Each structure stands twice: as C-alpha cells, then as structure tokens.
Amino acid sequence: MRKLFTSESVTEGHPDKLCDQVSDAVLDAILAEDPDARVACETFATTGMITVMGEITTSTYVDINAIVRRTVTEIGYDAPEKSFNGKTCAVMTAIHEQSPDIAMGVDDALETRNGAEADTGAGDQGMMFGYACNDTKEYLPKAMVILQKLARKYDELVHSHKDFYPDGKAQITGIYDDDFNIVSIKDFTISYNNAEKNREVTDGILKDIAESLCEEYGLKVERFLINPTGRFLIGGFEGDAGLTGRKIVVDAYQSFANVGGGCMNGKDPTKVDLSGAYIARKYAKELLDKYDLKWCEIQLSYAIGLRRPLAIYIDSDKGNLVPDEELYERGEPSHIIEELDMKHIDYEKQAMFGHFYD
C-alpha cells in the first residue's frame, strides 16, 4: 500500500504572502533605524485597499504608505489587469504603541527584577518548533525544497513574461516508503493566476520547470494538475483577501513538522514566535549532525515576561534526546538575538517563500 503525504507552498504574490511581506518590510524599515523597537505589525488587504495595523513602539518614523506601495509593486501588482495596483490602491494605518503591561516584562524579565541587572523577557507565551532532516543539503525534505524552488522560478516568470500574474500556489502529493523517504510523486498540483490567452504555452512552461526540479532530486511525476478548475483569470485581491499570519505552515515546514501557534512575520525578535522558532531550527540542524540523525524536531515553550524557556523537548528518529543546559541558556531571548544577529535580518526576504530554506 502506497503511503501518500502532501505538502504545499505559495508564490510571493499570494494575497496572504503579500501581507506577510508588507508586515516584514515595515519591520525591516523600523529596525534599520531603531534596532530596539517593539513591532507587532499585521496587514490586511482586499480589493483596492491595504490596511497596516498593530502595536509599534519606536523612536523613529517610517513612511508606511511608501513601504506598502514599493513592496506591492515589486511583487508584481502594478497594473489593473493583475487585479491590484500598488501605485493606486488605498493605504490605511491603524497603529498604537505596545501595551505597557507587556513592555514591563520584556524590558525586565521576571528572573532579573528586584535589583538585578535587567534582561529581556519573552514577548509572548507559547510553543515554537524547529525541524531538520538529512534529505537535502538544505536540511529540509525534498518535496519542500522543490516547492520553494518552484515558487522562486515562478516569481522570475511574473517579472519576465506578461501572461503570468503574481498569485499562485502549488502542492506535491508524494509517495513515501516505510522510512518516510519520498520515492515518487503521485500528483503535482499548480494553480497560477494568468492572462488566460496562451494557456498551452504557459502551462507547458510551468510543467517543464516542475519536471526539471523533480528530476534534480530523482523523482518522477505520475500526474500534473495545472489550474484544475480550468481557468484562473480572476486572482489576487479580486479573488481573495489577504492577511498576515495565515500561511504559518508554508512559512515553517509545509506540514512535515509541527508548527507553533504564532506567526513569525511583522514581529521584532523579542517576540519568541520569531526568535524561538529560529533558534529551534538551528538546534535541530546542530543535533542532526552531532548524533547522525535522519530527522530531528525540537519544541521550545515560553511564558511571557520570563527569559528562560519553560521546556525544551527533542524528538528524533533515534528517540527522545535530553537537552543540555546550554540549550536553555541559548534559548533566552537576549542570547538568541545576539547569536543569530536578529536585529539585522532581511525579514521581508525571509517572508517571500518560507522562513527556512537553507
């Protein structure tokens, strides 16, 4: 009996992904001038309008209107026929400062109050996951890497071929053996917004790209499903609304691993939804090499206002591993930010195709 498992990715012009990138573009602009800013920025978009909202505490000023228009037009929404135009859409903002009730715990963690030197507490509570496997040089599953590479190739087509529009998504339904190694692909599904004028040509271009990527990893495709409804002329924000944080599975591991409950986009690194997920990924890669594992998954959990993780749970193909004390220390927000230089990451780029692609 064949074991079937499906994973999915989206293009950078998918409405939700566009909102992720706008939120992170605002974050990047603020951190460039004020590395200690507190940012929790979310974006909502629908036909003809974008709203940027959230909590931002900063000593700098950024032109959010200009950031939105630049981000949207660079993605490829620059003409009416593409369902959205960053040059003419309405841009609204609804922003206030971070709650002082949260700030007091982030500025001075519970463990360091009452006279001790202040240290950063976690900006939220929750659980974050990190994952790595030995399938590829990226330490990611083959199907996931193929879909990420396809999304990048599609972005190139949007900017070089007038019949391709930014909105799209793809998924692979793979056939796996008993050790969860992908052996072939049952269905490769691609849905892409286009001018619907040269479908035989544009479908063929995408199929050739997808087949080439699969061949690179020694995989054959039994069936391609390309725009299986038959038509995808109405897309983008005429066909859907967009919202930051609705693609957390795409941003993380495309369902190959657990994901935490929080979005990573539009948040400064005191928010452990972001920093905790990043350090958990690094831990997983390190342990994969250290113990010669096939795969490794790590969960970190935090309480808001405390700097030390509440727990670290490590699972792998060789069973559970006991975390060293060093992992707890490295998992404190201030240590993560320093170790990974998280105030100087291009988060807009990270949001384009999924945060973990190497």
Image: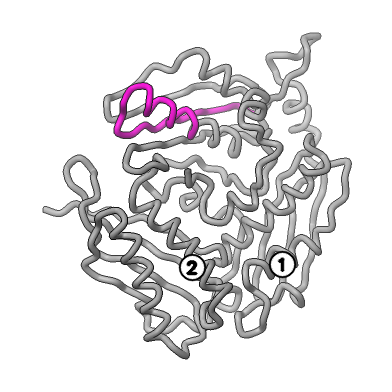
Q: In this rendering, does residue 257 appear at all? A: no
Residue pointed to by mark 2: 154
Q: Does the magenta stretch include residue 288?
A: yes
Q: In the picture provided, is 1 more to the left or to the right than 38? A: left
Q: Which residue is drawn at 54% across and 21% down?
A: 310
Mark 2 is on which residue type?
A: Tyr
Give the residue type at disc 1. Ile
For residue 42, what is the image quadrant? Answer: bottom right
- CA neighbours of label 2 inside 10 A, class few (<14), some (14 to 19), many (20+): many
Residue at 41% across, 65% down: 170
- Asked whether residue 34 appears in the rendered view, the answer is yes
Residue 354 drawn at (x, y percent): 51, 51
Q: Quadrant of residue 40?
A: top right
How far across and how far down the image is residue 298, in percent? 43, 30
Where residue 239 appears, x then y in whole percent? 55, 77
Residue 342 position in % (x across, y down): 66, 35
Q: What stretch is highlighted in magenta?
A: 281-304
Position of 45 relative to 307 (above/below)? below
Q: In the rendered view, does 199 fall on the left or right side of 157?
A: left
Please report the residue visible at 25 percent of the width from the left and 57 percent of the height from the top. Answer: 219
Q: What separation in Å lies between label 1 and label 2 (alpha carbons)?
A: 24 Å
User: Which label sits on residue 184?
Assistant: none
Q: Residue furthest left?
A: 1
Circles 1 and 2: CB atoms closer than 8 Å: no
- Read off the residue under disc 1: 50
Measuring 88% from the left and 50% from the top, which residue is drawn there?
Answer: 61
Whether residue 353 sits left or right of residue 118 in the image: it is left
Q: Residue furthest bottom?
A: 197
Sort mark 1 into few (<14), some (14-19) or many (20+) by Cα contacts within 10 Å.
Answer: many
Please state if 278 lies on the left or on the right of 269 as rendered.
Answer: left
